[in-house]
Amino acid sequence: MDKKIILDLGCGNKKRPGTVGVDFNSRSEADVFHDLNNFPYPFDDNTVDKIYIDNTLEHLESPLKVMEEMYRIVKPGGEVEVIVPYFRSAAAFIDPTHKHFFTVESFSYYDPSHEICQQYDYTLARFKVHSIVFHENISGGMIKKIVSSWANKHPLKYELYLSQLIPLDEITFHLKKI
């Protein structure tokens, strides 16, 4: 039985157990030192079972190229978990190294079942957006817990009608390679 390959791209000093950490910083917990702005990544086509990219994509030069590279290396049916600051969060704008901001529709460009992907065919990278989850791995006060629970059931309604009043901080996209 083959061992599953799970990558933690941009792992820093918080590498997930059981993963192969990838980071450019030699002072990090990475197993592979590589700048994620440089392509190709040092992995063969269709060899990775799962990828975590946690609070990293917003720092990189070209999210589109990063998504294409993850598409190249993940196996068909493989999973990608993207965790980014939500665009309404004050924390998204505090960090001067953040170059990109994300909404609930940001990964619709990769999902061929979504009208955005059908209308704007920017890339051949194709991922099914399996789920969108607010505050999956972070805590908050009672109000944020209630709001995130509702937002997770109705992400687009939350974004359109409530996010400007009670902004959540983080959003996780669970993707599957098509």
Image (cartoon, rainbow, N blue to C red):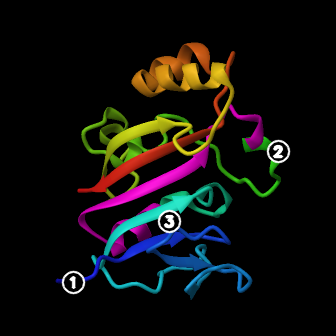
Dot 1 surroundings within 10 Å: few (below 14), some, or many (20 or more)? few
| Left/right of residue 6 with respect to residue 137 in the rendered view | left
The numbered mark, 2 or 1, whose residue comes first in the sequence reads: 1
Q: Choose top left, top right, bottom left or bottom right for residue 171.
A: top right
The kind of residue tagged 2 is Ile
Of residues 62 and 76, the one drawn nearer to the viewer in this rendering: 76
What residue is disc 1 on? 2
Q: How many marks?
A: 3
Give the alpha-carbon distance from disc 1 to disc 3, as whole Å: 26 Å
Image point (16%, 83%), residue name: 1
| Left/right of residue 66 with respect to residue 138 in the rendered view | left
What residue is disc 3 on? 66
What residue is disc 2 on? 94
Of residues 71 and 22, the one drawn nearer to the viewer in this rendering: 22
The numbered mark, 1 or 3, whose residue comes first in the sequence reads: 1
| Left/right of residue 139 with respect to residue 105 in the rendered view | right
Dot 3 surroundings within 10 Å: few (below 14), some, or many (20 or more)? some
